[in-house]
Amino acid sequence: MQTMNNDIETVLFSEADLQKRIDELGVELSRDYDGKNPLVIGILKGVVPFYAAMTLRITVPIQEDFMSISSYVGTHTTGRILLRKDLDGDVRGRHVLILEDVLDSGTTLTAVKQNLLERGAASVKICTLFDKPSGRKMDISADYVGFLAPDAFIVGFGLDYNEKYRNLPYVGVLKKEVYTK
Ligand code: IMP
Ligand code: MG
């Protein structure tokens, strides 16, 4: 059988590690957004597993919406942002919480955050499952961080390499031969 596991060099975060940290973030977010009825915006597609797991751990009422943005081809940023799918609803006056898979150069979230503020959001905060401070090119930080990630290309739990490995239930580093061949 074809298995994705053979392409993984090391497992960085197991399913249990991910769930434990998401549970902790759920407690924090539920407390911070109590009474605010936040609009929780997911950045597709990488956020899908995190979005599902994270929102199920928020105990206060929320609304859900999604945006799709592309900035990546292969393992390096193209520096370009493309809005592929916009929100369904209005953000004016709303407390917005952006959920993202990984904050790397910061190009994507800088553009998204600025755009949401321009549209009149009352507040915009960022919750990223992974933060790679070593990759940062923009002056932006997340308000909530799941894990600090090493300066390596990681896949799984939504994170892809050329649209593959998003459905790995854990997060790992891809073998170099996989993306150099
Ligand atoms: P940024 O705009 O450079 O901050 O990049 C954010 C986007 O780049 C994420 O939403 C991911 O799609 C992608 N990305 C950054 N680092 C990785 C990685 O290690 N693996 C997979 N995708 C990544
Ligand atoms: Mg991506």
Image (spheres, helix red, strand yellow):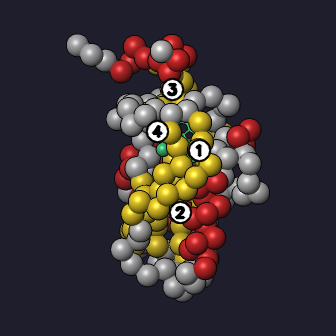
Front residue of 80/118: it is 80
Q: Write down the quadrant of residue 116 in the picture.
A: bottom right
Can you identify the residue that label 2 sits on? 98
Residue appearing at x 39%, y 31% in the figure = 165
Can you identify the residue that label 3 sits on? 172
Q: What is the CA distance from the residue labelled 1 to the residue labelled 2?
A: 22 Å
Front residue of 138/102: it is 138
Front residue of 39/58: it is 39
Q: Earlier in the sequence, mark 2 or mark 3?
A: 2
Q: What is the CA distance from the residue labelled 2 to the residue labelled 4?
A: 17 Å
Residue appearing at x 46%, y 32% in the figure = 161
Local packing at callout 3 (Cα closer than 10 Å; few below 14, some 14-19, many 20+) is many
- In this picture, residue 134 sits left or right of residue 5: right
How far from the left and from the top, in percent, is residue 132? 67, 41
Q: Is mark 4 within 8 Å of ligand 1?
A: yes
Can you identify the residue that label 4 sits on? 159
Q: Nearer the viewer, mark 4 or mark 1?
A: 1
Q: Please state which amino acid type lies under the numbered disc 2.
A: Ile
Residue 73 visible in the shown view: yes
